Amino acid sequence: MKRILILEDVAETRRWLSQIACAAFPDASVVEADNLRAGLAAANDAPDLALIDLRLPDGSGLELLRLLRSRSPQTVCVITTVMGDDANVVAALSQGAEGYLLKDQDEAVLIHQLGQISHGIPALSPVIARRIMNHFRDTGPVIDEVQLTRRETDVLALIARGLRNAEVAAELDIAENTVAGYIKEIYRKLGISSRAEASWHATRLGLRAQAKDGDG
């Protein structure tokens, strides 16, 4: 991560998140925004990582999330908030957030969770991961009824392990743009829009465990 955007209206929390981001990515430069308008303006420079608060004095951080997803799809968007209810979590993930961190966690835990992004692992607070698993179990589609092809299942298993598209392509000996096509179809069939959600679905299917066993 070379450039990090932090959208947070509380000055003390913003400085704290900046310190955490710098600890996780020592070589990165950090740009801070204290309101939605400033965040939208800063997004024009396409950050590598965006830490986005949801509740802001001039709107919702979801607006910045939507802008980045459309203009800068390579930006990793992580929600950083105190709101961990189902409505906010599902709204953020369904609009493309690739992580969801609660700000009441210890600093060391947040640094570790952010650092995992470089390895393709979604930055998720444990309580959020459990909440989303419960949400999909109770209200989501029945995964067993979703018909994934064998190749789509292989791709899902690999991206759930944190592999990037190029690494999946090398593993399966196919073109990288073919992998992108499979991922798009997997997202469509599962009704999802992020690798974080793909990871949860893979876990429910037992694919992550199988992939780990297969590593030998």
Image (tube, helix red, strand yellow):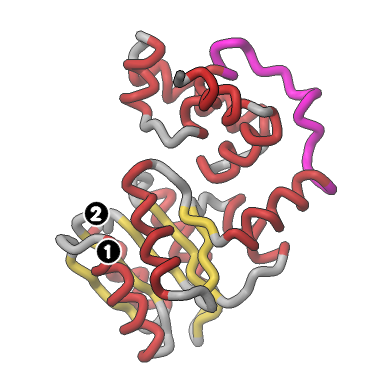
Q: Distance of mark 2 from mark 1, alpha carbons?
A: 7 Å
Residue 74 inside the magenta-drawn segment:
no
State left or right for residue 15 relative to residue 64: left
Badge 2 marks a residue whose secondary structure is: loop
* Residue 44 in sight in this render: no
For badge 2, the amino acid type reads Met
Question: Dot 2: few (<14), some (14–19), or many (≥20) neighbours within 10 Å?
Answer: some
Residue 98 at x, y percent in the picture: 48, 51
What residue is pinned by disc 1? 4
Q: Residue at x 58, y 77 (%)?
A: 82
State left or right for residue 136 relative to residue 57: right
Extent of the magenta region: 138-153
Q: Is residue 202 above or below residue 111?
A: above
What residue is pinned by disc 2? 1
Most foreground residue, 99 or 37: 99
Q: Residue at x 35, y 42 (%)?
A: 119
Q: Residue at x 35, y 9 (%)?
A: 173
- On-image quarter of the N terminus: bottom left
State left or right for residue 56 relative to residue 176: right
